Image: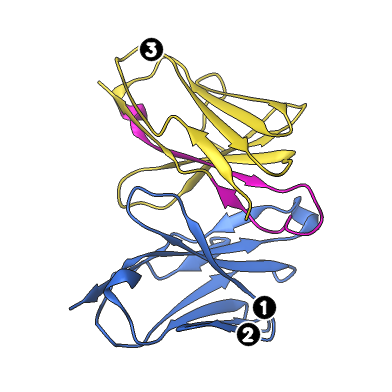
Chain colours: A blue, B yellow
Amino acid sequence: RKEVEQDPGPFNVPEGATVAFNCTYSNSASQSFFWYRQDCRKEPKLLMSVYSSGNEDGRFTAQLNRASQYISLLIRDSKLSDSATYLCVVNFGRNTGNQFYFGTGTSLTVIP
Amino acid sequence: GAVVSQHPSRVICKSGTSVKIECRSLDFQATTMFWYRQFPKQSLMLMATSNEGSKATYEQGVEKDKFLINHASLTLSTLTVTSAHPEDSSFYICSARPDRKRGSEKLFFGSGTQLSVL
């Protein structure tokens, strides 16, 4: 089993749609969780951290389910500019030397 | 916010030459930096973990003599692709984790280097 797993997609959705991505992780002691956005041939950029209580930033909502070991990202009212690859990143904590593990990324294309 | 500078952004070189890529943390110290490679339409692949003052830790399948890493200061790590060949053509990205307690759980990425070996 991979440390962090994501559905690679691609997800093709119309403008204005709501889309959700899930990501599962293998280490129950994981401490920090993030969603990064990566545009083609660019570096990943932090979209949002994911907190235990769930958090929202505008049209983006992130949630963490520790019991089931997954995190999710919900995008409402999709815009064309949301088209990108979304990376799930998990820090497994001190026991692993604070190693970061990446999902393979989920490709999103928002269609006019 | 934290900034990581990576240079150069693009390199085109002849087969057999060596290429050095620099990764600098501009406003924080980073004992640990990471180097990744990404082929088109594929995910980031961790190549090695760079540790200031000690040897880098390489992932399985990555040749340490091919990809030389030097982390001589708390703000600079370099990756040298030695005797580059066309199959080394790829997008190379570095990231750094701030040493300070607050923020050390996050990664900040350089802007990447597109290497093309002819």
Bounds of the magenta segment:
B87-109
Q: Is residue B108 within the magenta segment? A: yes
For mark 3, name the chain: B
Q: Are marks 2 and 1 on the same chain?
A: yes
In the displayed structure, would residue A68 be above or below residue B36? below
- Residue B17's label in the rendered image is 3
Q: Which residue is mark 2?
A: A54
Which amino acid, mark 3?
Thr
**How much space separates mark 3 and mark 2, taking CA atoms?**
49 Å
Q: Residue at x 74, y 31 (%)?
A: B52
Q: Is B64 in front, or is B19? A: B19
For mark 1, name the chain: A
Q: Quadrant of the C terminus of chain B?
A: top left
Which amino acid, mark 2?
Gly
Tell whether B28 sits left or right of A104.
Answer: right
Q: Residue B8's x, y, as percent? A: 43, 29
- Residue B78's label in the rendered image is none
Q: Which residue is mark 1?
A: A51
Q: Are marks 3 and 2 on the same chain?
A: no
For mark 2, name the chain: A
Q: Residue at x 51, y 36 (%)?
A: B6
Circle 2 SS class: loop
In the displayed structure, would residue A57 be above or below residue B113? below
Tell whether B103 sits left or right of B7.
Answer: right
**Do the CB atoms of the residues marked 2 and 1 lie less than 8 Å apart?**
yes
Q: Residue A12's x, y, as percent? A: 24, 76
Q: Dot 1, how many residues are within 10 Å of its Cα: few (below 14), some (14-19), or many (20+)?
A: some
Which amino acid, mark 1?
Tyr
Circle 3 SS class: loop
